[in-house]
Every structure is written in C-alpha cells, then in structure tokens.
Amino acid sequence: MSRSLALILSAVVAINSATAFSLGTTSTPQPGNVPQPVVQVSLSPLPPPPGGQTVVTVEVQLPSGFYQDADSSFLNFTVLNDWPQPHPLAEGPLTTSTPQTRRGHASFQGRFTLSRTVQVPPGPQPSHWSVRFSYQICQIDGACLLPSQTTIRVNLAPTPTLTSNPQKFVGQTAHSSSSQFSGPPLWAWLAALGAAFLGGLILNLMPCVFPVLSLKALAVVKASGENQRIQRLSSLRFASGEAASLLLLGLGTAAVKLAGGIPIWGGLFQLPAFVLILIVVFWFFALSLWDIGPRFAPSLRSAPATDFANGAVKVLAAAPCTAPFLGPALGFAFALPAWSIPLFFLAIALGLALPDLLLAAFPAIFKLLPRPGAWTKHFEQFMGFLLAGTALYMVWIYENLAGSSAMWVILVLLWGLTLLFAGGDVLTKNKRPWIRRLFFSLLALIVLVVGLILSQPATASAVSQRPSPALVSTSATSASRPLPAGWKPFTRQQLQQALAEGRPVFVDATAAWCATCLVNENGVLADPEVQQAFKTSGALLLRADFTRPSTPIADWLNEVGRAGLPVYALYVPGKDHPHLFPELLEKQSFLSEFSKLLNRP
C-alpha cells in the first residue's frame, strides 16, 4: 500500500475516535475536585433499645448537576456493629423517598433519603455503630463517576452539642470520608494492564480479526523468501501500524474524555460514514489482490508503508468487538483519569502486536514456512475473496445502520468502482507506479464521496423512521434486526419486573457490527440445548441491540462495568449483582455455568 494511503488510514483512526467514542456511556473518574454527596445519618429511637429495633435513615444531598439512579445496584447502605469486631446487623428491606423519572427510569436529584429497620442485639451496647453507604452518582446528560463508598461513624449516646435534635447525628460528608477518590491501588492497575495485554493478544484469534489476518498471512508468506533484515522490518512495520493506530485511538479517547465525552469501545461502527470508509478500503484491497488496478497488497520492496497500513487496518477491524479480559480492562480504563487511558491502549497494542514482535525477534521462524512460488498467486486471490467477503459483511452492517435503500446505493457504487479500476488499469498501464497509485487512490476517494452524498437521503430517511427518543428510552431498541423466537428487546422495566416476580433474566448485549456477537448467537445461544435450558429455567431473555446508539443500553453497560461488546449477563433473583459470562462462549461451559448459577442439575 502506498504511503499516502497509510497516512489516510491513520487519519481515519484519529478523526473517527474523536467522534464515535462519544456515542455511549460508561464510568468516568472521580477525582478529588469533583463534588461529592453530603451524607447524614439519623436513628429512631435513640439510643437503640437492646434486643429491639431502630430505624436508620441516611439522608443524602447530591451536588448540583448530578443524579443517582434509584434502581442502581450500587445504591445501598449497611449498618455495622463495631464491637468486638465489625459485623453487619440484621436488617430489614431498604426503602427510599419517591424518585423522579429520568430517561425512562427512576432517579434522585437534590436531596433524598434511604431507611431500613435494624435489629439491635441484646446486652450491652457499643459506643458507636458504623454505616457503610455505597452509591454511584452521574452527571446530568454526562458520564457516571466510579461506584464509591463512605463509612460514617455514628455515636449511640446523645451528646450535649446535639441536644436540640438528639435523634440526628451528622456523619462525615462523602468528600471528606473514605470515599474520597485517590485512584485504584497499584495491584488493580497492574491487573487491569495485564488484562488489557492478554485481551489484545487474544484479539488476534477473535472472528472480527480473521479476514484482515489474510493481509498479514500474505506478508509473512512473501517474507519467507527474503533475508532476515527484510523479515524483521516487515514484522516491525506491521507491529508499528498496530501500536500507532491504537495509540491514536487512546489519545482520541482521552481527548473526548477531557472534553466531557463518553467513550465506548466499538462506537465507531455506529457511524454509517465510518462503515462506508471501511467498505471502500476492504474492497480496494480485494481488487488489488485480484490484480485489478495497481498493487496495494503486501509488497516488501516496492511499498515500505504497506505493512504499517495493514497493521492500521487490523486495528480498525478489531475495534467492533472485545475479547476475554479486554472488556473488564476497558471498563476499568475508561473509569480512570483521561491521562491514563493511552497506557491501556498501549497495553492492548503490545498484546495485539506480540506475534509480529516475536517474528521480528526470531526471524528463523520464517524458515518453517514454504518459500514463495507459483502457488502464491492463487493464495493472493483466495485472500482477496476473504477481504471481499469482509467488505460485503460491512455492507450488511451499513444496511442495519442506514437502511436497505442506502445499501443498494453502496452495492452499485462498488460495482462501479470495480469497472473504473478495470478500465483505469488499461489506461495507466504504461505509467509510473506512483502515478497509477495516485490515480486509483483518487478514483476510490471520488467513489467514497459520491457514496456518502448519494446514500445521505436514504440514511436520513432510515433515521427518521427510528423510534422517538422517548420510545427509545423505554424500549432500548436501537436496530432493525428481527428478534429470534423467545427473545424480547431489552428494557429496564421488564428486567425489574421479572426479578420482582422471582424470575431469572438473561441479557445479551450485541450489535450487527460485532462479529464475535454473531458467532456466539448462531453457534451457542441459538443451539437447541441452550434454548431448552433457557426454557426449563423460565428465564426472561432480553436482547440489547447496540447496533445504533442507545442511551438505555449504554447506561446498562455502564452499570455492569463494561465498555464494549459482547456482554452476557444473568440476573438471579435474590442476588445483588448479575453474573457476567465470558465474551467468547463455548456451549458446554455455558450450559454448566448457567445451570450452576440457577442451582439446577
């Protein structure tokens, strides 16, 4: 690939990261200069009667511009008896003041209260109890802070300074208590960075990356017939393309975070324009491998920037889906201060590029590969079909985003691009290589611009036919993909209602642009044995389709601590938090884990 095309791809990564990462919602850091809620605790009666009951009330004053979800699993408090060792007291159910309705679900703003009845142990009483209050506040129309906790020490005997209201004891405000944000401990950073590295390494094996690996496979095959210096340079250039692209994404994410945006991994693929760019790029590669137009496929000597650009394309292809370890690491990273986010993207880059770095460090590996020959041409053409298939898969994604009319416009343009390349190949046959590359790059750019212009009316029509914002807030439906039998669109109301009825709930967060999601859906979740297990358990099956931007789904991803897809969560009645399954499902492991969680044989 030419140097100019490599620069264009790098610019695509940087520019789109600054726009698409603001499409979702996830946690943001909670630095010390962010205002925190003021918390007060009162007991009635006071002092608490030994062997009797007392009502503990937590009164919370939220800072201006923030709200607290009423149904958040992080909103709670526990009363601890500190003598002889801290231990929780028997508690009744939690009651709250009446919440407001915000974006289709309940939330608190300003001042609100929580209360519960506590069983007082018999015998002598300690001098104080501790109330451990947990919460997660969010900026109005902004991001959520990290889940936090504050412990408030409450004296059990009235003091002269509180005689005017002997039943109220003011605890520490959250911003001066143990909930003050000082950053996660060092071990948590190291664990998250290690998870990011492992996630990047495993990402090489995920379905979304398979087609693009054909470019690397072709480069490796060609390098097997070269000297060790060229082999090292080829692998290092490919790794550099991966690292530079991920670093640009990390810097773009940090910039969006500083500007008040909200990062979501894979949000790029919610932009029709970005998907259209990838369609043209992949089709461009496929035509090159079929010898239609100039040589833009891997060529070690004639185009030094080829491997770098291929590494960038690999990153773009990997962006729509996560891998094991990567989801939790991204959720952790996006909840940290903006300056730390690029560190995690570099850790992902190191894992993603590790195979290339090993090839550079040990070029003797190339000797194990067959030397290039006549068979290489057939291999190139086969790789071209893989890339063409990827482009057509992207066209299907484009249909889900922009509608079928826009899809047909793009298919016609791809056919036109092929004819233009075939004709241009004849016209520029005797021209210099750089002239040919410039000519065909301009052709592709013109087709891309025409595609954006012609598909815009169809895209606008498809967008206008989406549900209204109020309806989207209720239904959380963000795409037009039909639901399989037995599944319902994700809504918070259905989730809460099923749990209140004692019914388990399984949530599948997916998207048309997530190849791993589609593999899991068709290979595991649609399997008859798995469907029978769902039916036997009586679980409510909810599908959160995040193909298009959806605030309720983004809020839910934030709540479960994930920043990318896929996410599989099982809610079991009586348990505070959902169980999250691995990103890549295996049928027997999934069935075993599912049955174990529901205590079924």
Image (cartoon, helix red, strand yellow):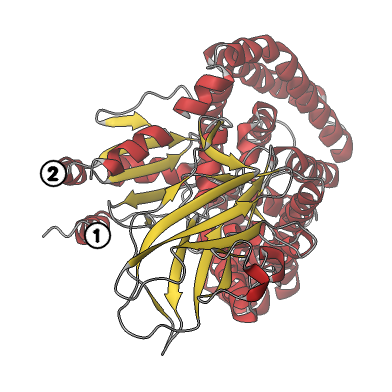
- Location of residue 487 with respect to 496 vertically, above or below: above
Please rate how many residues cluster around mark 1, counting C-alpha atoms within 10 Å: few if below 14, some from 14 to 19, many from 20.
few
User: Can the viewer see residue 260 in this picture?
Assistant: yes
> Count of labels shown?
2
Report which residue position mark 2 lands on. Answer: 536
Q: Quadrant of residue 273?
A: top right
Q: Position of residue 418 (x, y in %)?
A: 65, 22
- Location of residue 43 with respect to 103 vertically, above or below: below
Q: Position of residue 555 (x, y in %)?
A: 55, 42
Q: Position of residue 169 (x, y in %)?
A: 59, 66
Q: CB atoms at circles 1 and 2 under 8 Å apart?
A: no
Label 2 secondary element: helix
Q: Amino acid at mark 1?
A: Leu
Please rate how many residues cluster around mark 2, counting C-alpha atoms within 10 Å: few if below 14, some from 14 to 19, many from 20.
few
Query: Foreground residue, 90 or 399?
Result: 90
Q: Residue furthest bottom?
A: 84
Tell me if 329 is positioned left or right of 453 in this view: left
Residue shown at 52% from the left, 32% from the top = 547
**Can you tell which mark lies on residue 597?**
1
User: Can the viewer see residue 379 in this picture?
Assistant: no
Label 1 secondary element: helix
